[in-house]
Image (spheres, helix red, strand yellow):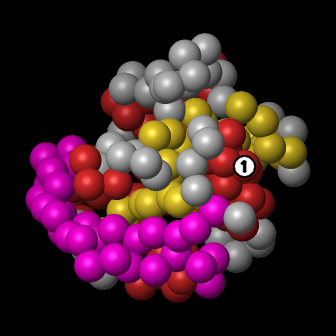
Amino acid sequence: MIVRDARPQDALAVAGVHVRSWQAAYRGLFPDAFLDSLSAEQRAARYTLGSPDPSAPRTVLAVAGATVLGFATTGPSRDEDVREAGELYALYVDPPRWGTGVGRTLMRHAYANLRELGVQEALLWVLVGNASAVRFYSSEGWRADGARRLEDPWGIEAQVERYRRALE
C-alpha cells in the first residue's frame, strides 16, 4: 500500500469507495432505498481532485496497485467559530479493508496535510449514530466539543456532531 495525492482520473474509483462506505456504514442511519440508489458515477462528477490551488481541499489515496483502498480529504475549517483550525472533510475506507490499518495510515497523512496548512487544531463532523466512526476517531484522540447541526447530504437530513483534536 502506498499513499499518494489524488488526481482527476481517480474520481470514479474514489467515488466507488465513497458510495460503498456510505452503504455499509450508514445502513440503519439513512433509508435503505436512499443508500441503494447511490451512484459512483453521479458522485464522481462532483469531485475536483488534484487542484493546484493550495487553498482547495486536498485528497490523498491509499492504493494497492491500481486499487483505491480509501481516501482522506482535508482543508481549512469551514466553521465560522473555528476559522483558525483545519478540517478533515472526509475519511473513507472501502468496507472490505476496514480494520486493516488503511484508515490509520490515511489519518497520519491527513494530520501531516493539516499541519502544512499551519494550523494547530483540526475538526471533523460525524453522523450522529455512527458508533464505529466515533470509536475510531476517539481512539485517535478526537473529542466531541458539543456542537451539533443538521445537514442535508444528498437530499437526506442528518444530524452531525463536531469533534476536535490538537495537532502535534
Where 58 falls versus 159 (above or below)?
above
Q: Can residue 46 be seen in this view?
A: yes
> Residue 24, how many percent across, how many down?
44, 67
Q: Which amino acid does label 1 sit on?
A: Ala
The secondary structure that most of the magenta stretch takes on is strand
Mark 1, Cα crowd under 10 Å, few <14 / some 14-19 / many 20+, is: some
Query: SS for tag 1?
Result: helix
> Residue 112, how many percent across, how many down?
72, 49
- The answer to if 53 sits in the magenta stretch is no
For the point 20% across and 70% down, the residue is: 148
Where 129 falls versus 109 (above or below)?
below
Residue 9 lies left or right of residue 21; in this view the side is: right
- Quarter of the figure with residue 158: bottom left
Where 5 falls versus 28 (above or below)?
above
For the point 58% across and 67% down, the residue is: 166
Q: Is residue 31 visible?
A: no
Span highlighted in magenta in the image: 139-167
> Residue 15, how many percent across, how many down?
49, 38
Q: Quadrant of the C terminus?
A: bottom right
Residue 4 lies left or right of residue 117; in this view the side is: right
Residue 58 lies left or right of residue 89; in this view the side is: right
> Residue 8, how many percent across, how many down?
59, 18
Pick the front one: 138 or 121: 121
For the point 46% across and 51% down, the residue is: 85
What residue is disc 1 on? 112
- The answer to if 143 sits in the magenta stretch is yes
For the point 59% across and 79% down, the residue is: 141
- Number of numbered discs visible in the structure rendering: 1
- Quarter of the figure with residue 51: top right
